Amino acid sequence: ALSFVALAITLAYPYAKRYMAMPQAVLGVAFSFGIPMAFAAAQGGNEMSLDALRAALPWPAWPLLIGNLFWVLAYDTEYAMVDRDDDLKIGMKTSAITLGRFDVAGVAAFYALYLVSWAVLGRALGLGAWFLGGIAVAAAQAIWHLTLIRSRTREACFKAFRANHRLGFAVFAGTALDLGTLSGSTTMGGWVGTGDTADYYRFVVGSTSNLNLVLSGLSADADLRLYNSAGG
């Protein structure tokens, strides 16, 4: 059921650029919908009912989705800053056009909302120093992005956009390392990024018996199905 909702949102995005002041929000929901879908895939059953859906989607799924939405708003606004002149000529609507001279401030706010919301949620779910370290590394990268895009040149804004896979990996790695223990190890990996900027990362973490959190838009169990040298 969730896949049909995600498909509808994805199909709506091209039209949103004609009618919405900030269509990147629609894209953000579409990209972030992988979070509740991963929860449902890992924890759901075969029943098609509202009760089954609620059981498959614990409360962290929704604040994770909202937080991730702000990340998409941040990096896709960077991309929209690249195309702003062309979009103005053809009458498209984007977050970069809507924010105007506050575009850099808007990107800063989006990054802050993403990282702060995930940091608070991660702490509420029991994550500790490694996770917060990953958030700190991601925050440092976000600040670097802001130094790039304040020039508002196409090249600098595109460079910042393309570097977001490293920002996402910092959060992913911090979460995975925090969940690891000294008892045993497993080689994990997963795709981090969007489109042609996605990279596959592989690294060693500890015990994976209790990985139930969401890592960069995928549940940990889903990532383990992508690559797990211990379990195949």
Image: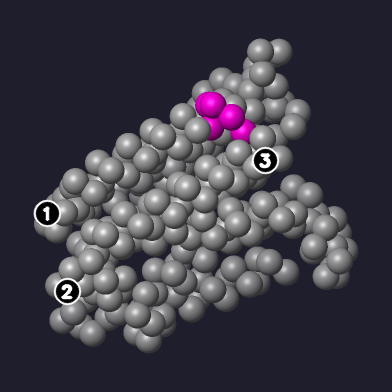
Q: Residue at x 38, y 82 (%)?
A: 20
Q: Residues within 10 Å of mark 1 (few under 14, many from 20)?
A: few
Report x, y in % for residue 117.
52, 51
Q: Are marks 3 and 2 in contact (CB under 8 Å)?
A: no
Q: Amino acid at mark 2?
A: Asp
Front tag of 3 and 1: 3
Please determine whether, in this image, residue 89 is positioned above or below residue 31.
below
User: Percent x, y for residue 168?
Assistant: 44, 42
| CA distance separating discs 3 and 1 | 39 Å
How far is the residue under mark 3 from the one under mark 2?
44 Å
Per the rendering, the mark at residue 113 is none
* Type of amino acid under label 3: Leu
Residue 33 left/right relative to 89? right
The magenta span reads 127-131
Q: Quadrant of the N terminus?
A: bottom right
Disc 1 marks a residue whose amino acid type is Ser
**Is residue 182 or residue 220 the one in the foreground?**
182
Q: Does residue 145 lie above or below 82 as drawn?
A: above
Label 3 or label 2, whichever comes before in sequence order: 2
Which element carries disc 1, helix, strand or loop?
loop
Q: Which mark is residue 86?
A: 2
Q: Secondary structure at mark 2?
A: helix
- Residue 33 drawn above or below residue 195: below
CA gap, disc 1 and disc 2: 18 Å
Say whether residue 159 is left or right of residue 189.
Answer: left
Q: Residue at x 53, y 26 (%)?
A: 130
Disc on res. 125: 3
